[in-house]
Amino acid sequence: MELLDNLALGFSTALLVQNVLYCFVGVLLGTAVGVLPGIGPTATVAMLLPITFSFEPVTALIMLAGIYYGAQYGGSTTAILINLPGESSAAVTALDGHEMARQGRAGPALAAAAIGSFIAGTVATVALAVAAPPLARVALQFGPAEYFSLVLLGLIVSIALARGSTLKALAMIALGVLLGTVGQDIYTGTPRFVFDQRELYGGIDFVSVAVGMFGVAEILRNLENEQTRTAVITKVKNLWPTREDRRRIIGPILRGTGLGAALGVLPGGGHVLASFTSYAVEKRISKRRQEFGRGAIEGVAGPESANNAAAQTSFIPLLTLGLPAHPVMALMVGAFIVHGITPGPNVITEEPELFWGLIASMWIGNVLLVLLNLPLIGLWVRMLRIPYQVLFPMIILFAAIGTYSLGFNAYDVYAIVFFGVLGYILIKCGCEPAPLLLGFVLGPLVEENLRRALIISRGDASVFVTRPISAVLLALAVAALAVAVLPAIRRRREVVFTEEE
Amino acid sequence: MKTTSRYRSAARMIAAIGVVSLVAACSGNGGATGGATGGDASGGYPDQNITFVVPFSAGGPTDTVTRMIAEPMAAKLGAKVVVQNVEGAGGTVGAGEVARAEPDGYTVLMHHIGMSTAPALYQNLGYKPLENFEMVGLVTEVPMTVVARKDFAPATLQDLVTYVKANADKVTLANAGIGAASHLCGLLFQTATGVKLQEVPYEGTGPALTDLVGGQVDFMCDQTTNTSGQISANEVKAYAVTTPERVKSLPNLPTTTEAGLPQLQVSVWHGLYVPKGTPQPVVQKLSEALKVALADQKVIDQMAKLGTAPVPAEDATPQVHRAKLEEQLGTWAKVIADAGLKAS
């Protein structure tokens, strides 16, 4: 019963008073930065990293990890309430979550997100404890070819994000992909679409795009006139999910958890696909497909669970192999180094209290998050009653501060203005921001991995089908495309047949 | 009435969170914007926060080194030091910002070897390393290691050279992106061996090392900071360290000279800079504080864990720093021109 011994060791470490305290501080801060538009976990962890230098290593890592998954939790709050996602995953939550808020069901939406996140967090923590090292080994099988096929599959299934016209959604994905190409090409160093602005060499920041396209554009639209103002809710129906709601979210939560936990393990960016894929799956298998995009609680519960599970399992490559999966993990590597721990596969054997203590703390952190967030739902919902003259300028102010804090770069703030206006024009044209954001996030991943796979294979494109994992993923992508396109073709044939009769 | 007070309390709460974040955002930038007053002489310097600009992301090796020395330097100077990360374009965004900053000693740049490679890599750099900066002193020279996937055939550095010469059309050489230390070291390897290899760029060391451990690429060259954990765990095969001396954390790893490729000499040297025109007494004061920080036992211990060490006290001076920069600018201009690289 080595596992039980390890878990006992982990909990005995994580339950030390100072560790519980800093775990709480971490998730509280994480929730706060998640809720605040703009400020993301990366900036927060970067700012707080020096403070943790004087802590015990395990305490420092527990707090920093808490900020990270706490922010995943808090990010859904603004997405639901004011249609302002702080991270790509929350953009999916905004689709149905904000619709629910407009219908006066912000409470159930927030509760579904919280409950889903807790269940996902718990399951993912168990997965971490039971199977972290073997899972990490499997994840290493994913090379550039596999990531290309995986992200391509993600892009295809995510056409489901479109509420209205598929054609417009495709156009938005393409625009997002193009925006994602701005900056220096990592393979040749050639600047692309930078217009001689050195600040654009590093590309456009995701937060600027999200805050502009969702938040600012939404505010502009709300300013048009009283009738279309939707951020201010007329009547809050109920705070808690109804029995029907609870029944409807069980399946999405469990599927989202599984999907998110699996994708999160992949160090090359699988976690960004988690919420998108979960949404697409739920929409595909739901009997109420027409409700998606119009306030389906499944569209909140599934992606939120997937996102939180992925946030948790994305620690697996870091903890078992010392390989960071994304910027926050890279900062954690910095934290390891500062504390004199060399990140790498030896951490699990040389520092067992740290490894197991951190895992145990994640579960404790999830409990704390639920205790923290459920009572806050009432408060958050009340926030919607702040008059818009106060609320809108505040949102813009915080968004500007948060975005600026990312890299102390005024360009990121100008970008909010640009994308706010662009987003408003697009809304007026009936185009939606979510597919654009998806293209923006996944486009560079597709390009990077496609080119890297071809560089390694010396231009031989057959790697995508000769490598088994890649081939399976591509086959799934083709199947997904067929499923998406066939009904349309069938319908057209039916139309043809009716005309002939 | 009741609802009014309710949303007021909610509004007050978000306002409070906002103030906290505003303070955080401003304190990070305090030194960079408000530094116009104390520039006349060193008499009053420093009388406000000093900003150390790191042109790379927080948590990276350069950031870590900066934060290590910031604390003892602040103690010696008697002022608060704020570390600010201004990322982008291989460190040139942050360097450009400091080049244009007020020359009063309140904006200090920590930069590495990239300072000497940028003029060759970027056409419209917007600043000239020797003309737009005053050098304060060198900080540390981080050694690099030549590492390969663990099932890669060659056993020693000599074997590796023979192997890549025979299989130049098959071998892949990873790096962390154009201008990254790993890229420069890889270029030098190709110059030293006279073989042109297929390079596979990544966005940062993390992903490159992930694919090396996963066996997707054959070999690369990277700082001990990143590789020593993987080397000790036998997740990668290590051939040599690229400095004249072996490193303490990897005592069994030979130097490139010992292993028979003495031309492959490269270290990620770090130095502190201030904008051109900063009064000499201020530069001297910073240099003195740097020497004190580098002699600090805690700094020595922390650097040892990274597989590096502070430079000797005589190198933490403007003169040695300038000489090093001049020499390196020449070296890399040639290596980069030979490789036909231009990032424009």
Image (tube, rainbow, N blue to C red):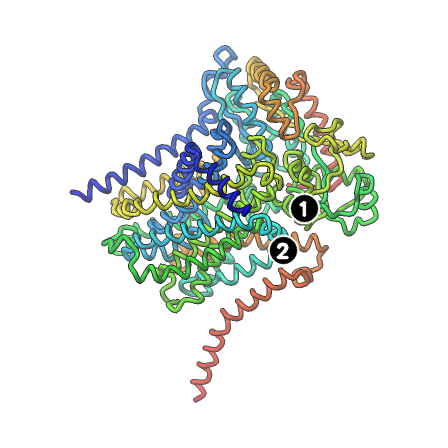
Protein chain holding label 1: B
Can residue B95 be seen in this snapshot? no
What amino acid does circle 1 point to?
Leu
Please state the horizontal and vertical placement of residue A73, each as a whole percent of the image: 40, 46
In the displayed structure, B214 sits above or below B65; it is below
Query: Is residue A243 toward the left or the right of residue A325 in the image?
Result: left
Residue visible at 37% across and 57% down in the picture? A96
Residue occupied by mark 2? A450
Residue occupied by mark 1? B212
In the displayed structure, A224 sits above or below B205; it is below
Please state the horizontal and vertical placement of residue A219, each as a whole percent of the image: 34, 49
Classify mark 2: residues with Cα within 10 Å, few (<14), some (14-19) or many (20+): many
The residue nearer to you, when weighing A442 against B115, is A442
In the displayed structure, A291 sits above or below A130; it is below
Q: Measure how far apart labels 2 and 1 are at the Cα level.
A: 18 Å
What amino acid does circle 2 point to?
Leu
Query: Is residue B172 toward the left or the right of residue A349 in the image?
Result: right
Please state the horizontal and vertical placement of residue A20, each as a whole percent of the image: 42, 36
Q: Secondary structure at mark 1?
A: helix
